[in-house]
Every structure is written in C-alpha cells, then in structure tokens.
Image (tube, rainbow, N blue to C red):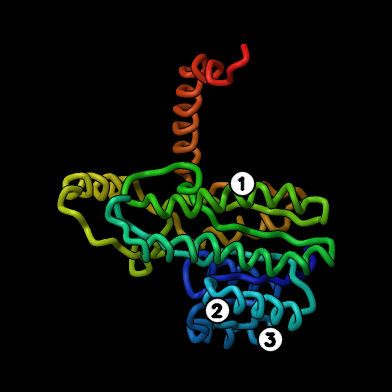
Amino acid sequence: MTTQKVWFITGTSRGFGREWAIAALDRGDRVAATARDASSLADLVQQYGELILPIQLEVTDREAVFAAVARAEAHFGRLDVVVNNAGFGQFGFVEELSEAEVRAQIETNLFGALWVTQAALPYLREQGSGHIIQVSSIGGISAFPLVGVYHASKWALEGISQSLAQEVAGFGIKVTLVEPGGFSTDWSGSSARHATPLPAYDALREQVVLARSQRGTPGDPAATRGPILKIVDAEVPPLRVFFGDKPLGIAKADYASRLAGWEQWQELAVEAHGGQ
C-alpha cells in the first residue's frame, strides 16, 4: 500500500506537469502545483479541492521560488516529491541566437530547476527522505541541429543532477532524471521560441524540419501518468529513465559513435598525458 505523498510540481499548466499532477491527485496524493498563470489551474482546484495548492510562480525568480517551496511545505507539512518540469524549447541555429534568447533558455531550464532544488533540499534533508524528479530530455544526452541552446540547458541539468544524486544519497534523498523523447506536449508548438533566421541556414533548416516531421508518432503525455507513479513509488528508483519508444535507439547509436571516436584517438590521448 502506497503512503500518501506530497508533491511540488513546476509547470503544471500543461504537458507533463499537468498530467503528473492529475496522476498524483487521482490517487489521493496532495500537490502544490505551480504555473506562471495560476488561473490555468482553476479546473483542477474545482475538481480536487484541498488536495491541490495552486501557486503562481515564475521559476527564474529565485526569491519567489524559495517562498513558494516554503509555502507548500508549511501548507502540507512535508514534501516528498519535487518535480522540476517548467521549461521551454528555444529554436535557432547557434549563430542565430541572441544573448537574450540564450540567457532566457538557461535561466528557465537550468537555473529554474536549480532554485527549486536548492529551496527544497533543507526540508528533504531534515525529514531524511524525498525524491527530486528532473525533467530532462533525450536532448539531455544527445544533440541535434537547431536546438543547440536547449541541449546546453538540459546537458547542464544532467550534470548537476548526477552530482546532486551522489551528494544527497546519504540524507535519504533520491534523484531521477526523466528523459522523454518526442511527446505531444506543445514543446515545439505555441510554447516554443524561435530565433530570427539567417538566410544562410535556410536549406539546412528545411532539412532539419523535414527530418523532425518523419520521426514518427509522438508519445501521449497522458500515458506517462502510470510510469511516473511507478518511479516515485520505487524503493530504488533509476537515476536516469527514458520516456518514449525512440530514446534508447538514439542513445545506443550516439554512445557507440562516441566510444568509437575515443578508441580511435586513444593513442593520442595517452601521448597527451605525458610522462611516459
């Protein structure tokens, strides 16, 4: 029998955040649900009542994040599952990106998750338990054209989270990176941002867009409700887990290529070490 959990979830207005909030609420868990526009949570409040605490939050505001986490812990008396889901996709070839676009991507996808994590850790340490879910992506371990700065934000999240997992294990805190493939979450739709295109990249842009359109049917976000509950209920949850049927194949091909390249140049690597 699963003990009722208290969740803190960012980005619950749509996509994974909303689906996972519903999954938790449907089984009687309590959820502090944050969104940039709290009115987007009105239907969930009406349906679930006191099980949900809606909080308006911009995750790039560190002070507001700490206040929101403190409010959630005070309201429910504890925190068990902290989900860093808020984020967006910035499209644009590396040369096309403005400073403002790069900073906004990193501020939201990386720093937003970091601020929530830092705010929650004192409470999790004190109670000697907790599970931090970092929403990464197949784009957190591989990379494709046109979304380089998005990859930068997720690769950084992967690195800091792997370190975090080792740092907090002794306090009874678990960390899991969820790495979805393509899902119908509006990630590349209205929530996406696009850099001003340079004509020099028009031909490549067409190729990239065509390739993306041929990747098959995207996953159903609602289908992830059961899997996320299995992860947070697992006695020994994974550090990394894919969501979707495509990521494993992408990872295998990418890592095979990396290993082959490193092996090919290993003699030079040893030479560079010196002292032989």
Q: Could you say where residue 186 lies in the image, as x and y percent from the top left? A: 39, 65
Tell me the quadrant of the picture where the N terminus can be found: bottom right
Q: Amino acid at mark 1?
A: Arg
Q: Could you say where residue 65 lies in the image, as x and y percent from the top left? A: 61, 75
Residues at discs 1 and 3 in contact (Cβ within 8 Å): no
Q: Residues within 10 Å of mark 1 (few under 14, many from 20)?
A: some
Q: Amino acid at mark 2?
A: Leu
Q: Is residue 254 above or below residue 214?
A: above
Residues at discs 2 and 3 in contact (Cβ within 8 Å): no
Q: Nearer the viewer, residue 107 or 129?
A: 107
**Badge 3 is on which residue?**
50
Q: Nearer the viewer, residue 70 or 211?
A: 70
**Badge 2 is on which residue?**
57
Q: Is residue 16 above or below residue 154?
A: below
Question: Quick one: label 1 or label 3, which is nearer the N terminus?
Answer: 3
Determine which of the numbered discs, if any, sits on residue 110 in the image: none
Determine which of the numbered discs, if any, sits on residue 240 in the image: 1
Question: Quick one: label 1 or label 2, which is nearer the N terminus?
Answer: 2
Q: CA distance from mark 1 to mark 3?
A: 32 Å
Identify the secondary structure beneath mark 2: loop
Identify the secondary structure beneath mark 1: strand
Q: CA distance from mark 1 to mark 2?
A: 27 Å
Q: Could you say where residue 258 lies in the image, as x and y percent from the top left? A: 47, 29
Q: Does any portion of residue 147 appear in the rendered image?
A: yes
Q: In the image, what residue occupies the spot 70% across and 73% down? A: 29
Q: How many marks?
A: 3
Dividing the picture into quadrants, the one containing residue 53 is bottom right
Q: Is residue 34 left or right of residue 195?
A: right
Q: CA distance from mark 2 to mark 3?
A: 19 Å
Q: In the image, what residue occupies the spot 44% across and 27% down? A: 257
